[in-house]
């Protein structure tokens, strides 16, 4: 794969350059247009990624020495686990700009600079193949997100942004500990190199727990989810879209990229716990979503439930489960991204997120209700939509795993139908209608909703292309996992003080 | 059985019914054009269905795969004798119902008529899709389409009663399909690796013999989940949504709750039992008889409840609950005679019950009366309506020469063939009960003195009377020529 330019690097550098350029631009209208154009160029720059080969190799590899004395490398690549997330990021960002076209009025330039930095950091997280590089992007993304909530958020933005920041930072501190431990034990920060090494059982357990906590907060899994509703409710529409569509996926991506390949024995050991927590997330998210009066909070809690499907799929360790998890990651990005954009649209009209202030839209905003209905159906896994594909895969994986886990998922699926119908029906037909003087969707709103709507059907009815992208990597991930978990578990009792032992060897 | 014939022409009826809702939306500013669109779509669909008849009667099975979600989970359409029955009835009665709609909706000056016609057409699209489903996933897809898009029809009046009824409707139908049907489908996929049903034959289904032998109880569980999940068949205790759905405008009750929705339910159940499980699996696991007993209970219990209802639509609703179980009892008895009777009843009940609902709606449009006790003497003012109502009642009771007799004949013979005296008694008791709640309506209308002032009432508009007379006539025709539909069952369920 030879291209005239380093594709992945350009995807990271270009938004940063654009952000710098944006500082020179004057005039609100121009700032929006320049950002939009920059993000479209970003997609054009990514076009070589369409040459992705449908195999399990790391592709578009860029590997340069960064800090040789510490063994740090600038190492980027994509594989089947990350390619869809890269695409999701690329396409979500322009939509985020479009959906905040009129909603943001203050500090417009800074807002768009934040979005551009965010783009670079997100691409970086999904493509970094060096632990430290990963960590740099992981933390870099925190600041623009914090600003998005803290500067452009709602009335309670200070509380929400600090909560978001503290939760995520706590997690990432532990992640840093794990990264250092891997360097000491494995002698490298390179993820592909570490994936071939075998660590002692106790070391794996400790590292797994440190990483899992960081990722579980990010996903978020029950009971580490409390920052999410606060952040979502206070964030501006674009912030919520990015948070839901991209940021949450980093947690589950972390599980797939680090926990399974680096600490397979620990992953297996803790799988029952992770499954239990995932099921709890699904049920808890569903039940709490059912009781919400704030539309945004409802969708936020539904995210907790849906992301529970993802983590569950991952820790089932079977093909359908992991494929389902990857699909659910993509689908949740499309659907919940769409729903949050719609909430932004209706908020611009009602200036309230309360269901009671957004009643009876069906007659006056049929196009809005059409899209809302579509995303709602997809959200609870209506057959023929993308939500169904992810859900059925996880279901199949769960029933393959055990009848009990499968049976526990069923009420989760029912709950998501219940809360989506509850809010949807009130918004469509609730009385008295609050929408009498509202206008239906404008062209801009059609534009940013049409994309996800098309994807709902495309992934829902013809997911073949996506399977081709992810299946080889999933197969490899599981095959590696299968061969390597056994080796360590057998060896575990012998080398009890594993981290210390391997650590001294290397030094 | 020969291999299915790959034919993209199967997409035609779906395309026509799929486009129809949008056509009615695009022509929303001119109500004549809007309703004309429905007529054209119904006619076209019916004609396309007719074009398949010769092939089906030769014993061919058609199949076409449109989308592949996963290996084994595809959107595949198939057509065999069983699908043909439902596929012919739905568009034919849709045409009738559209004519009737014009009289009813315009007569009562109902609101949101475009939404109404849109959802009506989508429901038919769903019904045709169910008829054409070659695997459980496709079946589930269209089954759910029907559920979602009939909700606005049930809640049409948008008052407290309408919303309460519609909520119950949704909770029952969506709840059961999520709680039972979805896991049933997933478990089937986990056990068999495919969801493709065996169209064109009733002997074997999708469960390989070794799977059945290895996990008999799991397969039984899957079966129970299917039966509970298909609540549209209104088998007790999952029947209660149907009476609640009667808050809908009467044409909705007529077409959807006598034909499209409930028939989609019993059709799906027949399809799952006969093509999904197959006679051999059903027999080896002993699944048929318990189902038949539940159905028999439903028949008698629903008939008893119907006796107590004074609201004509409520009485008809419970009658529907009872009559749907005729189909299930026939199919689950698994004897050739009983299966024939059950499947034939899908068609026979459709024509008779839509006539009854059409009649009830015509009475309502003219008199604004729903109570049977207020209908004394109305027969002389509305002779055509009540005449057709009487004929359809005879079909419900199972009197010759109306078509209900034919299916009951086969069912009774089927129970004898199976040696199930209890079920036979249930069927006969139901006949008496049917007479008990239908004959008084007729008697009041023609032979009792009016209790309310009926001066000035006259027959309902022609757009309503013509369809209800036509469907009544069809009931009689099917009584004389049952082979019209029986031939399809012969090529499908001959074993």
Image (spheres, rainbow, N blue to C red):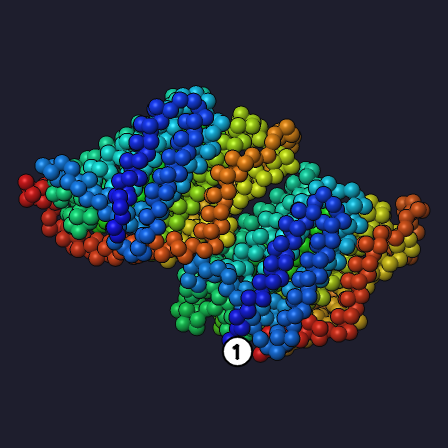
Which of these two is toward me, A130 or A119? A119
On the image, numbered disc 1 is attached to which residue? Answer: B2
- Does residue B454 lie above or below B211 as drawn? above
Q: Which residue lies furthest to the front in this view?
A: A4
- Does residue B451 lie above or below B191 as drawn? above
At which x and y percent is residue A148? 38, 27
User: At x 91% / y 53%, what residue is drawn?
Assistant: B381
- Does residue A87 lie above or below B315 as drawn? above
At which x and y percent is residue A275? 34, 47
User: At x 30% / y 31%, what residue is drawn?
Assistant: A17
User: At x 43% / y 27%, what residue is drawn?
Assistant: A30
- Does residue B211 lie above or below A226 as drawn? below
Query: Is residue A391 found left or right of A64 in the rendered image?
Result: right
Quarter holding residue A39: top left
Which of these two is toward me, B183 or A151? A151
Position of the C terminus of chain A by quadrant? top left
User: At x 46% / y 30%, what residue is drawn?
Assistant: A100
At which x and y percent is residue A241? 42, 35
Query: Is residue B3 found left or right of A121 in the rendered image?
Result: right
Query: Is residue A194 found left or right of A91 in the rendered image?
Result: left
């Amino acid at each position: 794969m030879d291209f005239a330019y380093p594709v992945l690097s350009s995807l990271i550098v270009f938004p940063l350059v654009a952000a710098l350029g944006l500082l020179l631009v004057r005039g609100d209208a121009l700032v929006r247009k320049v950002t939009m154009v920059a993000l479209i160029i970003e997609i054009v720059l990514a076009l070589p990624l369409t040459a992705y080969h449908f195999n399990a190799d790391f592709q578009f590899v860029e590997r340069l020495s960064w800090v040789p004395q510490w063994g740090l490398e600038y190492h980027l690549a994509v594989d089947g686990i990350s390619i869809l997330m890269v695409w999701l990021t690329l396409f979500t960002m322009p939509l985020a700009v479009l959906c905040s076209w009129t909603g943001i009025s203050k500090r417009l330039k800074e807002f768009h600079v934040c979005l551009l930095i965010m783009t670079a950091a997100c691409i970086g997280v999904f493509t970094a193949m060096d632990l430290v590089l990963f960590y740099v992007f992981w933390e870099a993304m925190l600041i623009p997100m914090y600003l998005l909530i803290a500067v452009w958020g709602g009335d309670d933005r200070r509380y929400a942004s600090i909560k978001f920041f503290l939760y995520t930072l706590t997690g990432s501190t532990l992640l840093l500990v794990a990264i250092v431990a891997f360097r000491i034990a494995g002698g490298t920060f390179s993820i592909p190199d570490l994936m071939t090494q075998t660590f002692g059982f106790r070391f794996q357990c400790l590292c797994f727990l440190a990483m899992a906590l960081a990722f579980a907060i990010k996903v978020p899994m029950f009971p580490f989810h409390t920052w999410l509703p606060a952040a979502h409710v206070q964030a501006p529409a674009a912030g919520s879209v990015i948070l839901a569509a991209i940021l949450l996926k980093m947690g589950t991506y972390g599980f797939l990229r680090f926990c399974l390949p680096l600490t397979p024995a620990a992953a297996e050991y803790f799988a029952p716990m992770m499954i239990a927590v995932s099921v709890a997330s699904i049920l808890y998210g569903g039940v709490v979503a059912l009781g919400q009066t704030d539309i945004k909070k409802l969708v936020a809690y539904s995210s907790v439930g849906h992301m529970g499907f993802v983590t569950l799929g991952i820790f089932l360790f079977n093909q359908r489960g992991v494929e389902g998890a990857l699909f659910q990651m993509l689908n949740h990005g499309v659907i919940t991204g769409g729903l949050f954009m719609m909430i932004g649209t209706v908020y611009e009209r009602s200036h309230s997120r309360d269901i009671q202030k957004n009643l009876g839209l069906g007659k006056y905003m049929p196009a809005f209700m059409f899209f809302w209905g579509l995303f709602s159906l997809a959200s609870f896994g209506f057959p023929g939509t993308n939500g169904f594909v992810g859900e059925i895969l996880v279901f199949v994986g769960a029933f393959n795993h055990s009848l009990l886990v499968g049976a526990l998922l069923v009420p989760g699926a029912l709950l998501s139908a219940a809360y989506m119908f509850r809010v949807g029906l009130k918004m469509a037909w609730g009385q008295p209608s609050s929408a009498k003087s509202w206008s239906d969707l404008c062209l801009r709103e059609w534009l940013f909703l049409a994309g996800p709507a098309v994807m709902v059907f495309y992934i829902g009815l013809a997911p073949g292309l996506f399977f081709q992208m992810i299946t080889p990597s999933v197969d490899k991930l599981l095959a590696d996992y299968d061969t390597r978990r056994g080796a360590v578990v057998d060896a575990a009792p012998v080398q009890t003080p594993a981290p210390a032992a391997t650590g001294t060897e290397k030094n | 059985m020969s291999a299915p014939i790959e034919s993209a022409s199967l997409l035609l009826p779906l395309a026509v019914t799929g486009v129809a809702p949008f056509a009615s939306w695009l022509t929303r500013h001119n109500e004549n054009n809007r309703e004309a669109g429905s007529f054209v779509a119904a006619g076209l669909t019916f004609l396309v269905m007719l074009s398949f008849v010769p092939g089906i009667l030769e014993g061919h099975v058609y199949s076409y795969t449109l989308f592949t979600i996963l290996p084994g989970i595809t959107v595949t359409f198939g057509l065999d004798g069983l699908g043909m029955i439902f596929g012919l009835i739905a568009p034919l009665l849709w045409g009738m119902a559209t004519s009737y709609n014009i009289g009813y909706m315009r007569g009562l000056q109902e609101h949101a008529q475009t939404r109404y016609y849109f959802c009506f057409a989508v429901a038919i699209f769903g019904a045709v899709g169910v008829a054409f489903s070659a695997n459980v996933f496709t079946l589930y897809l269209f089954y759910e389409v029907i559920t979602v898009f009939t909700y606005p029809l049930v809640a049409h009046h948008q008052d407290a009663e309408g919303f309460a009824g519609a909520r119950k409707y949704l909770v029952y139908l969506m709840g059961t399909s999520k709680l039972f049907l979805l896991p049933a489908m997933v478990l089937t996929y986990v056990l068999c690796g495919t969801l493709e049903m065996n169209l064109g034959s009733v002997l074997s289904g999708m469960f390989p013999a070794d799977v059945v032998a290895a996990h008999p109880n799991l397969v039984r569980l899957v079966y129970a989940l299917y039966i509970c999940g298909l609540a549209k068949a209104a088998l007790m205790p999952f029947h209660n949504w149907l009476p609640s759905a009667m808050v809908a405008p009467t044409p909705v009750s007529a077409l959807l709750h006598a034909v499209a929705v409930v028939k989609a339910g019993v059709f799906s159940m027949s399809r799952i039992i006969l093509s999904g499980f197959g006679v051999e699996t059903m027999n080896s696991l002993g699944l048929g008889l318990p189902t038949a007993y539940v159905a028999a209970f439903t028949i008698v219990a629903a008939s008893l409840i119907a006796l107590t209802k004074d609201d004509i639509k409520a009485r008809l609703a419970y009658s529907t609950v009872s009559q749907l179980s005729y189909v299930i009892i026939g199919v689950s008895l698994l004897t050739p005679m009983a299966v024939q009777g059950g499947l034939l009843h899908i068609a026979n009940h459709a024509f008779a019950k839509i006539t009854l609902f059409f009649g009830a709606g015509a009475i309502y449009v003219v008199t604004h009366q729903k109570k049977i006790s207020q209908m004394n003497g109305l027969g002389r003012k509305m002779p055509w309506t009540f005449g057709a109502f009487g004929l359809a009642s005879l079909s419900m009771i199972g009197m010759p020469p109306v078509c209900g007799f034919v299916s009951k004949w086969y069912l009774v013979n089927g129970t004898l063939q199976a040696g199930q005296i209890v079920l036979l008694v249930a069927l006969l008791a139901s006949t008496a009960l049917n007479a008990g709640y239908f004959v008084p309506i007729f008697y009041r209308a023609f032979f009792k003195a009016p209790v309310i002032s009926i001066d000035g009432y006259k027959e309902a508009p022609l757009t309503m009377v013509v369809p209800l007379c036509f469907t009544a006539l069809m009931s009689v025709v099917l009584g004389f020529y049952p082979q019209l539909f029986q031939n399809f069952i012969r090529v499908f369920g001959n074993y």
